[in-house]
Amino acid sequence: MKTIVISLLIVLSSSKVPQKTVQPTTVDQDRQQKITQPKNTTAMEKQAMEVVSTFLTAIQQGNHDVLALSLHPDVTWNQPGKNRFAGQKTSRADVFKLVGGMVEASEKSLRLTDVKTLAVNGNQVACLLHWKAMQSNGGILDVDNIDVYTVKNGQIVNATIFSADLEQEDNFWLN
């Protein structure tokens, strides 16, 4: 899996597809993502980038209303791993249940601490993100993920999540 993630990162960094980049942000900063508009971006790509950027900002700010509006009611969410949260979710309600379970299991410490890169291709946006969480039993999550979101009609209809360290995630989330 690490090979796939590394390969995806190499492809994203060397791709000649018009890309939009987001300067790194953390939850301790202003929460304002500075976005560089790529040249020759289509209206579809602009919309996809705006929807995903808004979604990620809402995650960092804990804005549940914006999160709900960003996800299509029948969104498909593919969560990697062999832990209790892994697998495919097929609705916004399932995604909220997934995230609620993760927040509970992390003792409310789960944070999207860094949005490193956003790259757009058509109606898909690939994001390099960093997540952190701690548990009172000593469990630590400190991992990069690559999320690929598909946007249609102003909402995320599909999300596929890749982890740079599935073993760490599986150990943290347990089975």
Image: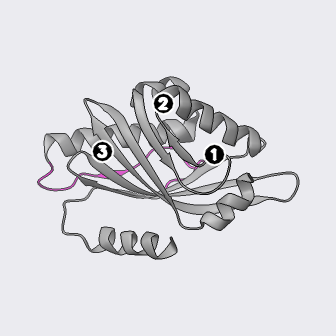
Which of the pair 78/52 is nearer the observer?
A: 78
Which residue was labeled with disc 1?
A: 85
Q: In the rendered image, which quarter is residue 71 located in? A: top left
Please give the range of residues in magenta.
25-41
Dot 1 or dot 3, earlier in sequence: 3
Q: Position of residue 93 (x, y in %)?
A: 53, 26
- The residue shown at (40%, 37%) is 54
Which residue was labeled with disc 3?
A: 49
> Can residue 63 be seen here?
no
Question: Is residue 37 part of the magenta span, yes or no?
Answer: yes
Q: Residues within 10 Å of mark 1 (few under 14, many from 20)?
A: many
| Viewer-nearest of discs 1 and 3 | 1
The amino acid type of the residue labelled 2 equals Leu
Dot 2 or dot 3, earlier in sequence: 3
SS under mark 2 = helix
- The residue shown at (59%, 47%) is 27
| Viewer-nearest of discs 2 and 1 | 1
The amino acid type of the residue labelled 3 equals Met
Which residue was labeled with disc 2?
A: 67
The amino acid type of the residue labelled 1 equals Phe
Q: Position of residue 129 (x, y in %)?
A: 50, 57
Q: Is residue 46 above or below residue 170?
A: above
